[in-house]
Amino acid sequence: MANTHVTKRAKYKTTIKDPGTPGTLRMTFEKILFVPHNPKSAGKLDVEFRYIKGQKHTKEGSNKPPWLNLTNNQNGIFIFEFENYSDLQECRDFVGKVLAKGGEVSEKPTVAYPDEQLSAAEMELRIKLLQEDSELQKLHKQFVLSGVLTETEFWATRKKLLDREASKKTKQRLGFKSAMISDIKPSTDGRTNKVTFNLTPEVILQIFAEKPAVHRAFLSYVPNKMSERTFWTKYFRAEYLHSTKNSIAAAAEAAEDEELAVFLKQDDILASEARKKIRRVDPTLDMEADEGDDYTHLPDHGILREGSKEMTESQNELYKRSLSQDINRHAAVVLEGRAVDVELEDTKAVAEALAQSKQKSSNKGESDGDTSRERLDRLSRMTEIEDLQGPNTLPLAPLCIKDPRDYFDSQQANALRSSGDALGEIEQIKCGLSTQEVYGSLRESISSIKAMGLKEPIVKPEVAHQVFDALTNSISNTKYHIGKNPQESVLDRLPRKTKEELLHHWTSILELLKHFWASYPITTTYLYVKVNRLKDAMSNIYPQLEEIKGSVPSELRHQVSLLVRPMHQALDAAIQHYEASMQKRSAQSGERPNGYV
Amino acid sequence: MKFQIEDVTVYFPYDYIYPEQYSYMIELKRALDAKGHCLLEMPTGTGKTIALLSLITSYSLSKPQTPIKLIYCTRTVHEMEKTLAELKLLHNYQIKHLGPQARILAIGLSSRKNLCVNPTVLAAENRDSVDAGCRKLTASWVRAMAAENPNVPTCQFFENYERAASAAVVPPGVYTLQDLRVFGKEKGWCPYFLARHMVQFANVVVYSYQYLLDPKVAGIISKEMQKESVVVFDEAHNIDNVCIEALSVSVRRQTLEGATRNLNRISQEIDRFKATDASRLRAEYNRLVEGLALRGNLPITDNWLSNPALPDDILKEAVPGNIRRAEHFLHVLRRLVQYLRGRLDTENVEKENPVSFVASINSHAGIDQKTLKFCYDRLHSLMLTLEITDTDEFLHIQTICDFATLVGTYGRGFSIIIEPFDERMPHIPDPILQLSCHDASLAIKPVFDRFQSVVITSGTLSPIDLYPRLLNFHPVVSRSFTMSLTRDCICPMVLTRGSDQLPVSTKFDMRSDPGVVRNYGKLLLEMVSVVPDGIVCFFVSYSYMDGIINTWNDSGILKEIMQHKLVFIETQDVVETTLALDNYRRACDCGRGAVFFSVARGKVAEGIDFDRHYGRLVIMFGVPFQYTLSKILLARLEYLRDTFQIKEGDFLTFDALRQAAQCVGRVIRSKADYGMMIFADKRYSRHDKRSKLPSWILSHLRDVNLNLSTDMALHIAKEFLRKMAQPYEKIGGSGRKTLLSEEDLEKDGRWRHG
């Protein structure tokens, strides 16, 4: 790590309103040291980092001065006001690193860890996760800070958590505004006839998306042929001409200025796009096909002047654009959503990004040939009359386990009952097959998957349903057996403190076991050290469990011991395995003269 | 499910059936048994189409010795696709239960534009260019030339189809247009000509109205259909308009100019042929002496739009001598164009009947009635002789000949109206000469005569006794069904006032009143904030819609609406409207919600469904009366009064209300669906208007909902939506069942027989 400490000038405040003591802030991996400039004044501070729980800071651009707010585990706060934001940022990053790597730093590593370069964003994400989930935080504190697990190891088993968080951030993309572009009203200065348009990159992107011809013109004209400013001036000139609805004037102006004409003409790109899109339209509303089939309305056939059909002027048609067209186009663009996901700053960048994304989507549109298939599917879905149909599928209730503990509690309690009385049926199912049969069916299904690929659905709904039933039918049963009140589980009858402790032990044992078993087979010294550490941590749990047992009232002791028993068993198994493998190892290493531990 | 209606086992592809579908089938079967025509009105959203299809196919399955053919006419191509999709569902079901004996062949037929798979031809912009492009590659003389000179391009698909000859058949099954294209591509056969060929053998043919009603098209496509066919006109509430449009022609200055150009070109061609191949023109002359029988043995690709008059009206006689020679015919046409040009140069509106018009042509241009009558066929023959393939260039002269033939054939039921300018734009001279048909029965008469059963059905045929009069036929069954509802899933309301209690209406003197426009805007604004998913608005005309949208845009109402829902608008451009509709559906699908602005009598109102979440509310702004100052409409009203004793006002109201009902009826598809309908005009509260609405709407229009203001309507809408969100029993309450299962029907059957 490049910096092992940070030193900045800052003011230290005990509360928000405190004007603060000026001084020097020095942060190392171990502690935070604040020395006031005035040696006499109070406010000298010397805190160890491991007591610091979290940090907050003011945002740049807000009106607040650059503050860093550290909280310790007793909910005390330390506020530092920096001279500028860059100082704040540096300190903030440093604190972030230290908070996240607390464990590593406090204990001198015996072996070299695979070095981990963490970006600030990842760090923040981890901190955020810890803050949101108190249980996770507890575990983190217990194992990482005490050095049983390293930071990396701890998070390695939670990659999914990190990924999901990361993906969630990018998922939601801002759409276009519902307001039309023509709603951009200019501001006047009130004295002259000059008007000023305020264009933001946001608006420009919208203009480009709705008017591909303007987009194309921008790419080809700016900045070679004209400046961006003239470009937009011309654009709004054209818009003004449209708004006057005087197509003759528009035609006249267009004849004089060919660049202006680009804006005034009908958008030819839109027209060609429309022709492409019409092929993918739902056949149940393809009115263009009707036109192709309509021989009554040959030109000059049928009834013309009937009121419903209006005459259109063919002159100046080129420069006429109706509001309805604009509205349709606008709504289509809003519906399509924003294709570009760049930081909007520069018009040029916006224009190019849009061009790229269009290229991509048009390539994609050409490549997928099964649109007709989709069209047909849609058609058949549209034709079915839904309520004449009998119920065609099994009524499905979407699975929603709000609290997984609910499920595992009941399974736990299942074991609590003397094993054997109610489990008869399940065992029957289990024992119905011999090993060969199981093996055979497994082989069969694998080969069928190989031959045909995965089917949809992968598991037959009936089978899934059966398995699910078998697994869950005891949930309600158990609840019924244990407490008459369905909300009450075994754990609820224990004192609150005991319950929490038990649960905490469960999770921490699970965490340890997870890491423990994942370390086998031991191939590197790193793993060897890790297993040792884990084993020590596990053996520490035994007395704690005993202690819990001892602390509960006698009438509950039996139940607690029943609850504790599986934990014991799991730990025993792990330690047994550890010892066995140690023996093997020492037997091997015995041959070596100076066997390393 | 399958069940018994008397001696017919009906296969129905669903587990349940609505009681009205069941009684619909019973009535339909009676009509089939009686081999007569029938008129059936059943509300939209009760599965008419599937009931019809399943009864008729089951009927012909149960009588294998006398199979009947089903000719199913839809108004639009997308309805055709939908019908075929339903038929596919039914067919699969029948095959599952009956095995291979249930196999039928069902095909959809459309123009080259929709069926062609040749990429070079398809690249053309519009229908006529596609037709011409096809002819350029497939006309008999082009192919003859290509046989000698391999550099002459032909269409590979057509050549393959020809080569396969009688082997080119479509195996049984249900083919949508898309399926036909795919099949054609696979085999390398031209789907268009294949479909044309298969029409004769298919058990079910689905195509658009005009293939039967418009003599130009029907002459080619439908002439070989057997008498033992059932013809169904679905969504037939506008059938009278289709009929009169099929026989109406108008001529404008541009038409005449174009026709003159065409004539010059033809005359050049004649000169060329005289120089190179005079024998050809002589051969034509000889053929014409023998009469027009030539049509029968023309190669399929040389067929062109047929004679605009009805087949029986053209006698099988020889073409009059004075137009047998090509030059003479050309002179006749030039004189006719000259005469029409003179008639267009008028200062006043003129109205004439065909008889006096023909007399005047005779005296001024020296063309007699019989010559006029043969114009179209003579032109056709000439163009074939001259080997003209770019027929799309010759539309103008075709129009003139159409006109001549029609005016020479019919003495009554038509009038000729010449207007020097459009009423609404008197300062722009735009003369137009219109031959307008007033009698809908003329075009449909051959259909009634030729086929044993014709079924006319729609969601709105009220008043049901009017249609037999308009179309001049005698139905053996004429019934109107109501809808049995499980719950009150439709909620019609009449809104007469805005929140400020001022009346709203699109009456001519009120429609541009800013107060009315604002109140309409406020109504929509309130509704978009409470109604989920899709809302559809119908306006009385394009110009009114444009005006009101512009006003809303200026006053900021539109912007506020956009904050709640995306806005899409029907325009006169079909492509744009189709894309707007597609986007509208996607906006409803994804939950964003949208409003669609459309026009009554427009293309969208005619055929697009806004079922389920695509339309939870439909607002009809105003009463969609026809443009009453139109000369054509006045002439038609006069004709109706004189011939059928139908009062003008009655007809106008009937016409407006059937359009309104049609618009609002688009929101319901099944009984699980629900939707609200707001009639926003004070005139709807009057009894004489309201009573013209179909009974299934009237029965849900409660008296308290007859005179609402915006705030009251909003309250009702909220209540209604909340009620509809509750779960309900699909089968219906204890009182009467709204869904019947197989057992229910069995019981019913026993009761009927016992």
Image (cartoon, coloured by chain):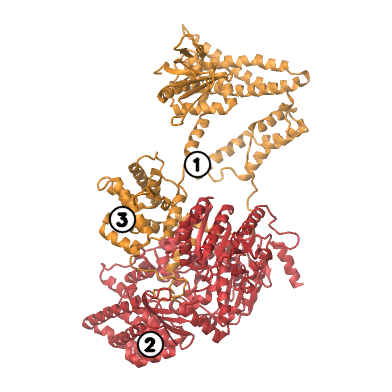
Chain colours: A orange, B red
Mark with earlier residue (3, 1): 3
Looking at the picture, tell me which residue is in the foreground, B399 or B80. Answer: B399
On the image, the x and y values in percent for residue A478 come to 73, 33
- Residue beneath the point at 67% across and 35% down: A430
Kind of residue sitting beneath label 1: Lys
Q: Chain of mark 3?
A: A
* Disc sitting over residue A262 in the figure: 3
Whether residue B541 sits left or right of residue A490 in the image: it is left
On the image, the x and y values in percent for residue B111 come to 42, 69
Q: Residue furthest left?
A: B275
Kind of residue sitting beneath label 3: Val
Q: Which residue is mark 1?
A: A450
As drawn, B311 above or below A440: below
* Disc sitting over residue B372 in the figure: 2
For the residues beneath circles 3 and 1, the answer to whether they share a chain is yes
Task: Report, in whole angstroms, how far the alpha carbon at label 1 lies from the one at label 2.
Answer: 76 Å
As drawn, B651 above or below A368: below
